[in-house]
Image (cartoon, rainbow, N blue to C red):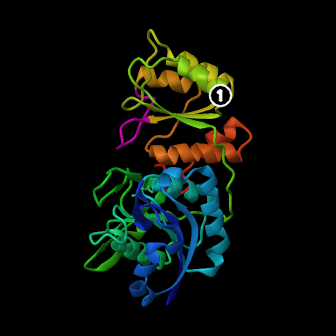
Amino acid sequence: MKNILLLTTGGTISSRPTEEGLAPAGDKDPILSYLPTLKRVYNITVKGILNLDSSNIQPEEWQLIARSIYSEVKNYDGIVVSHGTDTMAYTASMVTYMLLGVPIPVVFTGAQLPIEHPLSDGIDNLRTAFAMAASGKKGVFLAFNRKIMLGCRSVKTHTTDFGAFDSVNYPLVGVVNGGGLSLEERFIPNISHEFALRDSLCRKVFLLKLTPGLDPAIFDMLMDMDYKGLVIEAFGSGGLHFIRRNLIEKLHAASQRGMAVVVNSQCLYESSNFALYQTGQKALEEGAIQSYDMTTEAAITKLMWALGNCQHLYGVRDIFSKNLAGEINEHM
Ligand code: ASP
């Protein structure tokens, strides 16, 4: 039997109703009562490392989760992390970077309904996650609704539907169907990095979603607040306004101040290409870094991680030019 570690962090899957609404149950994590059938197939060890709604999972918790996985990797064939769905895509992306080259499967999962609810999707999601964790495939994955995707391509796209996550701009790496766990091995990236814990990050990264006519003074505020990095979700293939309210001028000021500015699209699917239009080319001339077809979650966490690991802007630019774990289509 494969040795699988389950790290629990809270989320709906582990929640019970309280007077203030659903909250993670803590010490007597309800997940534990649902493991006996899985225990017939796997040797399971459970460790509770957090007990949080994932809205409360922040950079400090990402580090704790990455460290917990790192310290256990050599003892198990695979690790499942149960996590709230709301920020799971961010955690899965960040953990992908922090644990590049991880030699076993690390699989995030959760549920839309508490596991004790008679109609919960939690049991199915755990089953899928355990099957993936026992697969021997290296990397960080997210298992949900009988689908397996790369952690760094996952996005929460539905608030209540059991198909809560999509693999954006990347095929699923596996599904569970009548044939059992069926994997598309060619889509599982072969990561050449030597495995290490790289858990430094910079929290001073801001996400700015453009709206028509947005006041450029927002950039001054971010610089005054000492933000080191900015991800701009621009329009369509890649455009920012520069008439009447000149955002390009502010990009110039930001790059003079050493702020790393990454640009991507508000469109969820397909790639941005800032070279296409004049409004985008002007941004590139001011030093904006393109994130092409990355998800916003993968871009934000990559920028935090790159700034935490590089002294200079050219290091950040270099990291963004590379596909580390399937998060970017390197042929763009
Ligand atoms: N609010 C919950 C969380 O993210 C939602 C969920 O787990 O589905 O922790």
275 drawn magenta: yes
110 drawn magenta: no
Quarter of the image that includes the C terminus? top left
Number of numbered labels in the structure image = 1
Give the residue at the far top of this rendering: 244
Nearest the camera: 23 or 250? Answer: 23
Q: Position of residue 12 (x, y in %)?
A: 41, 61
Residue 33 visible in image: yes
62 up-or-down from 82: above or below: above
332 up-or-down from 261: above or below: below
Q: Position of residue 37 (x, y in %)?
A: 39, 86
Q: Residue at x 44, y 67 (%)?
A: 14
Give the residue at the far front of this rendering: 19
Q: For disc 1, does the CB lie below 8 Å from ligand 1? A: no
Nearest the camera: 46 or 320? Answer: 46
Q: Is 284 left, or right, of 40 in this rendering?
A: right
| Residue for badge 1 | 225
Q: Residue at x 43, y 52 (%)?
A: 86
Q: Residue at x 69, y 46 (%)?
A: 308
Q: Position of residue 138 (x, y in %)?
A: 53, 70
38 up-or-down from 308: above or below: below
Nearest the camera: 70 or 37? Answer: 37
Q: Which residues are magenta?
A: 265-276
Nearest the camera: 140 or 3? Answer: 3
Q: Hey, which quadrant is residue 183 in on the image?
A: bottom left
Q: Main secondary structure of the magenta part?
A: loop
Q: Residue at x 63, y 67 (%)?
A: 68
